[in-house]
Image: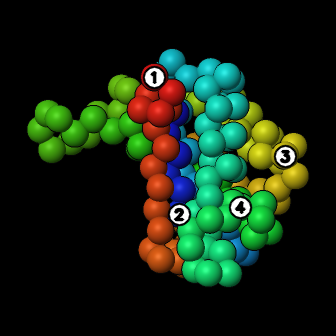
Amino acid sequence: MKFVIQIAEDAKVEVNNKVTGSIDKGYMVLVGIGPDDTKEIADKMVKKMLGLRIFPDENDKINLNLNQVGGELLLVSQFTLYADCSHGNRPSFVNAAKPDLAENLYNYVVDSCRNAGYKVGTGIFGEEMKVTFSNIGPFTIVLDSEEIFK
């Protein structure tokens, strides 16, 4: 499982020119699901993401987590995080989870964040989406379950 987390001043996602999710200050997160991912991995990833201390405190030191700043989440499914560009110039997506598994785990991540008390905006799984946001910093973190939960 991969999360690309970007601190956003605001963010929204549109499908067919209709806003399906929007947030104020918080994280705009691209969520990629791999074929071997499970709910247990999702639980660890959500816990890690929500615990990240990447917002500045009163001394401008990166020390506060999402909850401490009253942040929100925009979670967008993104199978292209599993692109394999090692051969030729056309990416392969064989390393991404099949759509049924990916959609179930994506929805599980969304529900887990909502159950933790966060406002969560989303796109629509499998649809072409337009995502716009104002990245603060810019500040971007990549969480990859294969790297951090070996």
Residue 20 image point, x, y percent: 73, 62
Residue 72 image point, x, y percent: 75, 64
Disc 2: which residue: 6
Assess disc 4: are there few (<14), some (14-19) or many (≥20) residues with their C-alpha within 10 Å of its C-alpha.
Answer: many
Mark 1 and mark 4 residues within 8 Å of each other at the beta carbon? no
Q: Distance of mark 2 from mark 4, alpha carbons? A: 12 Å
Q: Image height check: is 101 above or below 140?
A: above
Residue at x 41% of width, y 43% of height: 81
Mark toward the viewer: 1 or 2? 1
Residue 109 image point, x, y percent: 70, 39
Q: Distance of mark 1 from mark 3, alpha carbons? A: 25 Å
Disc 3: which residue: 116
| Nearer-N-terminus badge (1/2) | 2
| Quadrant in the rendering for residue 48 | top right
| Nearer-N-terminus badge (3/2) | 2
Which numbered dot is residue 66?
4
Q: Distance of mark 3 from mark 4, alpha carbons? A: 12 Å
| Quadrant (top left, top right, bottom left, bottom right) of the C terminus | top left
Disc 1: which residue: 150
| Nearer-N-terminus badge (2/4) | 2
Q: Distance of mark 1 from mark 2, alpha carbons? A: 24 Å
Mark 3 and mark 4 residues within 8 Å of each other at the beta carbon? no
